[in-house]
Amino acid sequence: MRHTPRNIFFHELIGLKVYVADHLSPSYIGKKGTVYWETRNLLIIRDEESGELKKILKKGGVFIFQLPDSTQVVVRGEEILARPEDRLRKLKTRR
């Protein structure tokens, strides 16, 4: 299944480009790069400018993800506050 704006919440985010549009922690705002790893509470991104890995809390953030077809999707951190496999489980229990 390919990434779309409707199913991004249930997809793996690793490998997608991301921009931190807003965050409760001002030091995160403006960070951009590629999602390197994801945990329940964190996005770990490879910073586009420095190449360093940065840990960004999901909670309190507003992220803009770029899908493989270059579509951009705005996602609140609370909407992805779970491990990818747990987000998928939630989808299956809704059906």
Image (tube, rainbow, N blue to C red):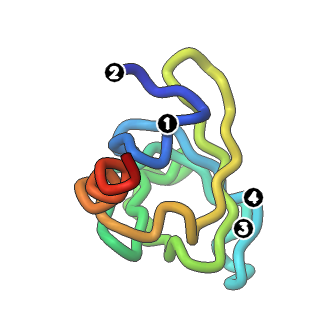
Q: Are marks 1 and 3 in contact (CB under 8 Å)?
A: no
Q: Which residue is mark 4?
A: 21
Q: Secondary structure under badge 4? A: strand
Pointer 4 local density, CA inside 10 Å: few below 14, some 14–19, many at least 20: some
Real-space CA distance between mark 4 and mark 3, rounded to the nearest whole angstrom: 6 Å
- Closer to the eye: label 1 or 4: 1
Is residue 25 placed above or below 36 in the rendered structure? below
Name the residue carrying label 1. 7
The mark closer to the camera, 4 or 3, is: 4
Q: Could you tell me how far apart the alpha carbons at marks 1 and 2 are, in whole angstroms?
A: 9 Å
User: Residue 18, percent across and down?
Assistant: 57, 46
**Which residue bears the numbered disc 2?**
1
Q: Which of pointers 4 and 2 lies earlier in the amino acid sequence?
A: 2
Query: What amino acid type should be assigned to the residue bearing mark 3?
Result: Ile
Which numbered disc flags the more N-terminal residue, 3 or 2?
A: 2
Mark 1 or 4 closer to N-term? Answer: 1
The Cα atoms of the two marked residues, 1 and 3, are separated by 25 Å
Residue tagged by mark 3? 29
Residue shown at the point (64%, 50%) measured from the top left: 19
Q: Amino acid at mark 1?
A: Asn
User: Which is more N-terminal, label 2 or label 1?
Assistant: 2
Please, what is the three-letter code of the amino acid marked with disc 4? Ala
